[in-house]
Image (tube, grey):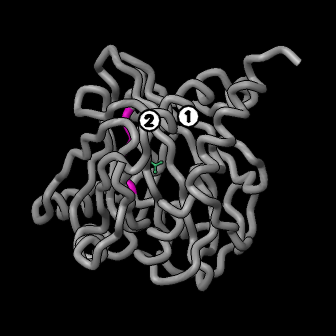
């Protein structure tokens, strides 16, 4: 696979649209390892949290910020393919804010309301919206299983008020309606291993999963070094992030899978 190069054109695109979609950033073995480890991971199953949408349908997720573990999840979060890209897009050193696995089970997985990530993170006393995430498609994500939707360029609207809908917090519907009159709605259909880098003020949502296919995705979230934030569990203030060679994803993944499946 040809290594990914972040071009000046993509940087301009990120500044203009609030996101860039990189096809096949990760290869099949990396994604197969992540999916089978994620599905077999009892420790993560124990901390899974269900978020209900306005109709009461549940999406599952687990959120972690254990940056020191040499496991496959950290292999992704620390890898140069993501971190170097983030640093160039955000024009500063970045550190890991947390990572999370988002699981929409076939037929039952719920929707996510329109929101900006900074709509939540603002309340952690993050001073600036200078934060971003890398959303990695673990399964194929398409309209039927509730792929991510974004409003192109909405990161330039600034922070929007957020309120409660079901057990989720979403952006002010009046403001979202206004944005929808003027901005393009983009369905981010993605093959496994593709990645969406998106700004923390980009409005995004997703539909429920009405298909027979699961929709798993790993989201690695980063803050910039210059952005002070309250130190909270799962939402830490600055801790330098070591960059790891991309090969560590497979190295840690293969080892973790062996440890999970081969009796000691
Ligand atoms: O997984 C999804 O569809 C949406 C996730 C999301 O919006 C988030 O974690 O901020």
Residue 56 can be seen in this image: no
Q: In which quarter of the image is residue 12?
A: bottom left
Residue 105 can be seen in this image: yes
Which residue appears at 14% of the width and 63% of the height? 183
Q: Is residue 229 above or below residue 52?
A: below
Q: Which mark is residue 34?
A: 1
Q: How crowded is mark 2: few (under 14 residues within 10 Å), some or many (20 or more)?
A: many
Q: In which quarter of the image is residue 123?
A: bottom right
Q: In which quarter of the image is ligand 1?
A: top left
Q: Where is residue 51 in the image (x, y as percent from the top left)?
A: 53, 35
Which residue appears at 34% of the width and 54% of the height? 2
Q: Is mark 2 on a helix, strand or loop?
A: loop
Asked whether 202 or 66 is in front, the reply is: 66
Residue 47 in magenta? Answer: no
Query: Which contiguous range is marked in magenta?
Result: 111-115
Q: In which quarter of the image is residue 155?
A: bottom left
Q: What element carries label 1?
A: helix
Which residue appears at 68% of the width and 68% of the height? 241
- Asked whether the beta carbons under mark 1 and mark 2 sit within 8 Å of each other, the answer is yes
Type of secondary structure dominating the magenta stretch: strand
Q: Residue 138 carries which label?
A: 2
Q: Residues within 10 Å of mark 1 (few under 14, many from 20)?
A: many
Q: Residue 263 carries which label?
A: none
């Amino acid at each position: 696979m040809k290594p990914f190069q972040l071009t000046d054109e993509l940087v301009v695109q990120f500044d203009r649209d609030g996101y860039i979609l990189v096809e096949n950033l990760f290869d099949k073995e990396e994604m197969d390892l992540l999916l089978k480890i994620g599905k077999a991971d009892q420790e993560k199953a124990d901390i899974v949290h269900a978020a209900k949408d306005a109709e009461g349908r549940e999406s599952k997720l687990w959120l972690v910020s254990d940056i020191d573990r040499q496991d496959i999840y950290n292999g992704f979060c620390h890898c140069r393919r993501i971190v170097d890209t983030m640093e160039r897009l955000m024009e500063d050193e970045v550190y890991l804010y947390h990572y999370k696995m988002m699981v929409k089970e076939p037929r039952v997985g719920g929707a996510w309301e329109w929101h900006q990530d900074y709509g939540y993170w603002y309340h952690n006393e993050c001073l600036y919206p200078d934060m971003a995430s890398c959303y990695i498609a673990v399964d194929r994500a398409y309209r039927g299983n509730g792929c991510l939707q974004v409003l192109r360029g909405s990161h330039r609207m600034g922070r929007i008020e957020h309120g409660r809908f079901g057990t989720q917090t979403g952006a002010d519907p009046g403001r979202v309606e206004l944005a929808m009159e003027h901005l393009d709605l983009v369905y981010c259909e993605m093959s496994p291993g593709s990645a969406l880098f998106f700004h923390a003020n980009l409005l995004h949502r997703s539909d429920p999963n009405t298909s027979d296919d699961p929709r798993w995705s790993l989201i690695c979230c980063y803050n910039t070094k210059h952005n002070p934030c309250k130190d909270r569990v799962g939402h830490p203030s600055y801790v330098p992030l070591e960059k790891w060679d991309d090969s560590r994803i497979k190295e840690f993944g293969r080892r973790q899978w062996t440890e999970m499946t081969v009796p000691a």
